[in-house]
Amino acid sequence: MELSLANGGTVAAALTVDWATYPTLQDVVDKINSTTVIATVYGQWRAQLAPGVDPSAKSENLARTTITSVSSTSAASNDAHRGRRDVRRGPHRGYIYDSKAKVNGLYVTAKLGGVSGSKTLQLSAAGSGAGCDAALVFYADCGDTACSTAVASSKGWIRAFASSLPAYVYFKRSALVGYDKPAKDRLYFTSSSPGAASTGVSLAANLWVASNRRDGVNNPGQVMGIVDIQGAAVIAYRKRIALFINERGSNTAEDFDCRVQTINDSRGCISPWSVVSVNGCAVYATNVGLVATDKSKREIGLTADLYQPIRGKGNMSYEFPKCVAAAASDSPDCWMAGASWGNRLVYSYRYSASIYGFSVYDFSRGTDALGLESLANPDSRQPYGWSSLCRLQNGVTAMGPRAIGAVSASDGLRLYGAMNDNNGTADGRVDQMFTGADGQRLRDLGLAVEQGGGGGRTRASPRRT
């Protein structure tokens, strides 16, 4: 570990802490804190262990941001051959290859096989140059490389500004037990039991205890989203829907009384972006369409007119099967994303492989109620209608928004969406939605449109003029 101060491109060499001399994390911390330095030259460092970290953990288990290996490379090749067994486990994918003989900016994309202790790393593109490096240097871009290009040794630096911006040094993956097998169905929550403040933490958001952990039962799959509703929480797992609630009463304030109850044990959530909190309800995408529930643990379907799972018809008939497949394979290829926009729900989705758009669900007639009674007609117990598909403007080749949300402004609520692509370039963007002519008419008229599967029937009812 090296600690340095860069001032105008000049490095004041200060302190090097090697793992052999300081084998534990506590040794490293003590060494840093006991070092006497000249404040006018490069300042004084202070270090501390993060809460919960074992001070006796080996310092060699810290992740290196710069890794140097002795080996050779081929000139116009995507491969880098490393011959030292002691660094065979690194670098990981994503580490940048810094070389004079090859094009700078290449990075590791895969680890290939090797013989006799050698290891071949696959690079992001073919290199060029003399074809041989005395030393292979790989580094992780920790955010400071571009800010200190005048300093040749700045690759892999983690910037720190006193206590206002501390630098965090992380463990490498192999040092964390079970890191490659995370408990994706596990729920942690902070403590709020009477007397919890006596531990010295007055805010529940800062108070974590080992006993406040709930594991999923009946193989629920990973947690896709959590929604706070009326003093409880809906937990959308991949294979089931559950309710996290105080079983003895809403005001016992005892952490022990909080348990996970089943809402639906036969189906779960298929898109994490679809989980929305609205008016005391949780809305989420399932294999039969968008579903809403509340503290009563009843469920109602909202998209029968937009998706018929048996017939495979409706405006959402392309997106839902894609989300089902993505959830089963733990893939991010799910684009059913929702947001609450005042007294409306807005969901973006793929109408086809190349068409992206929105549908709007207006529940303004139920805003005086709470829970499911506000999202569906309390008399008929049927959902209110959806708008027809509002496509993204022609000429926009970007994928639809993966994340959308409403922001309060001086002129009301504005709806924004985060786009993955920007007209064919590599940069993403954030767009304000429903600002064009069609979107403005949709906002002003507040149309409720019910459209049958496959465009069978359409009924429009103006809410207001």
Image (spheres, rainbow, N blue to C red):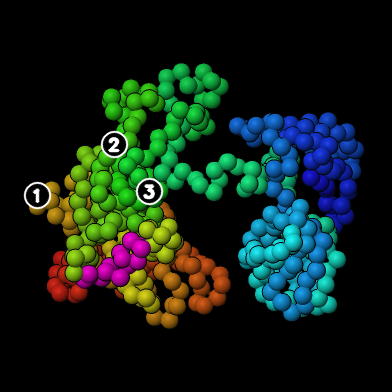
Which residue is rendered at x = 78% and y = 62% of the image? Answer: 83
Label 1 Cα crowd, 10 Å radius (few <14 / some 14-19 / many 20+): few
Residue 120 location, x and y as percent?
Answer: 70, 66
Task: Between residue 63 and residue 420, name the one nearer to us.
Answer: 63
Question: Is mark 3 in CB contact (under 8 Å) with mark 1?
Answer: no
Question: Quarter of the image holding residue 305?
Answer: bottom left
Label 3 Cα crowd, 10 Å radius (few <14 / some 14-19 / many 20+): many
Q: CA distance from mark 2 to mark 1?
A: 28 Å
Question: Quarter of the image holding residue 248?
Answer: top left
Label 2 Cα crowd, 10 Å radius (few <14 / some 14-19 / many 20+): some
Residue 440 location, x and y as percent?
Answer: 32, 69
Q: CA distance from mark 3 to mark 1?
A: 36 Å
Residue 98 location, x and y as percent?
Answer: 77, 65
255 is higher (above) or lower (below) than 142? above
Q: Tag 2 or tag 3, which sits nearer the N-term? A: 3
| Residue corresponding to mark 2 | 261
Task: Between residue 448 and residue 115, name the one nearer to us.
Answer: 115
Which residue is rendered at x = 46% and y = 67% of the image? Answer: 419
| Residue corresponding to mark 1 | 379
Q: What residue range appears in magenta? A: 312-325
| Residue corresponding to mark 3 | 221
Q: Amino acid at mark 2?
A: Gln
Q: Residue furthest left?
A: 379
Q: Amino acid at mark 1?
A: Asp
Q: Tag 1 or tag 2, which sits nearer the N-term? A: 2
Which numbered tag is attached to residue 97? none
Task: Between residue 405 and residue 120, name the one nearer to us.
Answer: 120
289 is higher (above) or lower (below) than 39? below
Question: Which secondary structure, mark 1?
Answer: loop
Residue 3 location, x and y as percent?
Answer: 81, 45
